[in-house]
């Protein structure tokens, strides 16, 4: 069974998605930064997020903040990519490829 690499866009879709993907990527990064700031403020009761080289925070706080920031960024980046692609396909009226079924062994 041949599996795609997750990048199964046709030539026209790739061309249409590039500028949209760049724009959405920028917006997603800004959104992820804001969401992280809000989440960190709620869980730590501090206005600023810990900076990696700051002596004002413990190593544990800095690593926890970095882990949380990465998780939030990854979630938002994936959501933006998926919904951006769906939007381009809908705009181009391109049918979605059939879903692959998982084969359990």
Image: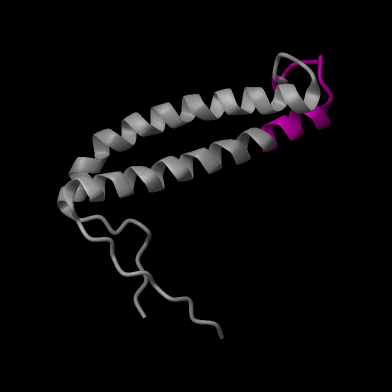
Q: Name the foreground residue: 60 vs 31.
A: 31
Q: Residue at x 29, y 44 (%)?
A: 87
The residue at the point 45 percent across, 31 percent down is: 28
State the residue at coordinates (70%, 20%). Answer: 49
Q: Quadrant of residue 104?
A: bottom right
Image quadrant in which you'd find residue 62: top right
How far across and down, in percent of the image, does residue 16 sit? 20, 41
**Side (left or right) of 2 relative to 65:** left
Q: Quadrant of residue 55?
A: top right
Number of labels in the image equals 0
42 or 70: nearer the viewer? 42
Question: Is 54 positioned to the left or the right of 80 in the image?
Answer: right
Would residue 54 be counted in the magenta stretch? yes
Q: Position of residue 68 (x, y in %)?
A: 68, 36
- In the image, which residues are magenta? 51-67
Q: Quadrant of the C terminus?
A: bottom right
Relative to 51, does residue 19 appear above or below in the rendering?
A: below
Q: Is residue 83 left or right of residue 35?
A: left
Q: Position of residue 29 (x, y in %)?
A: 47, 29
- What is the quadrant of the N terminus in the image? bottom left
Protein image colouring: one colour
Q: Foreground residue, 74 or 59?
A: 74
Q: Is residue 16 above or below residue 42?
A: below
Specify whether 95 is left or right of 104. left
Q: Residue 34: say if magenta.
A: no
Note whether 47 is above or below 84 in the view shown: above
Q: Percent from the top left, x then y, of residue 83?
A: 38, 45
């Amino acid at each position: 069974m041949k599996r795609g690499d997750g990048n199964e866009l046709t030539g026209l879709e790739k061309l249409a998605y590039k500028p949209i993907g760049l724009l959405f990527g920028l917006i997603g990064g800004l959104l992820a930064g804001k969401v992280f700031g809000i989440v960190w403020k709620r869980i730590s009761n501090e206005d600023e997020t810990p900076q990696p080289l700051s002596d004002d925070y413990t190593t544990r706080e800095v690593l926890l903040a970095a882990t949380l920031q990465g998780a939030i960024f990854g979630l938002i980046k994936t959501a933006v990519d998926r919904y951006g692609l769906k939007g381009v396909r809908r705009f181009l009226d391109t049918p979605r490829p059939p879903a692959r079924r998982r084969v359990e062994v």
